[in-house]
Image: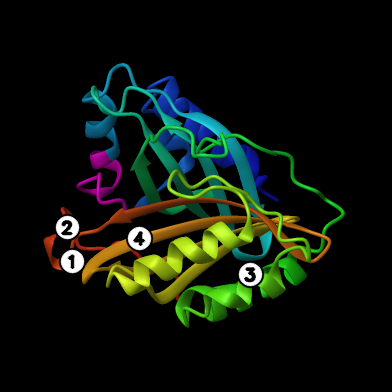
Amino acid sequence: MTDIRELVVTADRELFTEHDVTTLDRNFSPDYVEHSPLVANGLQGLRDLVAGAPNMRHDVARVLVDEANGLVALHGSYPGLDPDELYVGFDIYRVADGKIVEHWDGLVTETPPNESGHTQLDGPTEVDRSANTETNRALVKEVWNTFLHSQDYQSMIGFARPDGTFTQHSGDIGDGVTNMIKFLENLKQDNGALTYDTLHRTVADGNFVLTHSEGSIGGERHSFCELWRIENGYLVELWDAIAPVLPDNELAHSYGAFTSTEL
């Protein structure tokens, strides 16, 4: 049985940090599907990306392995991908029959630490293997439907710790449930609400659950990646990457930014 964590971590390191494109032949399916708006066309697009960024590396802070769905998520940064900006965010890989077959990402530029001093990547990294993955996945799906999709922002009071403590890594929001609710309600009042239309996938591993969603802000299509940490049945920490995405018919490939080829 393939160790999908080892497969993805190794292939990612070989490709983006060591620039060994032979990993594409060894670890990726010939029919690999690339959904990233940054990559034009499958395996050749990855070769072109690596060739065009000779100083690029991928610094991975977190690895989530969702065995039930054949998914591995990486949370990290890409020094050298762009000469002027540091990109930070999430990569989601799907593995089938021992090969990487599909990839999505959600990347944003680095922002300064938020008012509570947290960055987009700091905080706990170890997965709690004693946590119930499926219970936490179900909790986060409920949060997505109620708090994000239905925009019932006050509902977060019931999902977080009773004392309202919450660690926030978004650059625009400080710690605490109250700050998060106030920020989102203000956006909604200013006609800039985060509108979540479709939850395309979750990557759940112990006490961490990543959601990958499609929606819009002010009418502009966006990708939403939210990584939640759960402790004792409460949401206690959040990292995100929210980025504009072109309509599928304007992307550099024909696969779409969100949908999966998996039947």
Foreground pick, 64 / 84:
84
Which one is earlier in the sequence, the residue at label 4 or at label 1? 4
Q: Is residue 174 left or right of residue 66?
A: left
How far, Cα to Cα, is label 1 from label 2?
A: 7 Å
Residue bounds of the magenta highlight: 32-45
* Residue 74 falls inside the magenta stretch: no
Of circles 2 and 4, the one toward us is 4
Q: Amino acid at mark 4?
A: Ser
**Label 2 crowd bin: few (<14), some (14–19), many (20+), radius 10 Å:** some
Check the image and name the residue furthest to the top.
55
Q: Amino acid at mark 1?
A: Pro
Q: Quadrant of residue 163?
A: bottom right
Q: Residue 47, percent across and down? A: 27, 33
- Image quarter in which the C terminus is found: bottom left
Which one is earlier in the sequence, the residue at label 2 or at label 4? 4
Which one is earlier in the sequence, the residue at label 3 or at label 2? 3
Give the residue pinned by disc 4.
Answer: 223
**Label 1 crowd bin: few (<14), some (14–19), many (20+), radius 10 Å:** few
Give the residue pinned by disc 2.
Answer: 251
Instruction: Assess whether mark 2 and mark 1 are in contact (beta carbons under 8 angstroms).
Output: yes
Instruction: Assess whether mark 1 and mark 3 are in contact (beta carbons under 8 angstroms).
Output: no
Give the residue pinned by disc 1.
Answer: 247
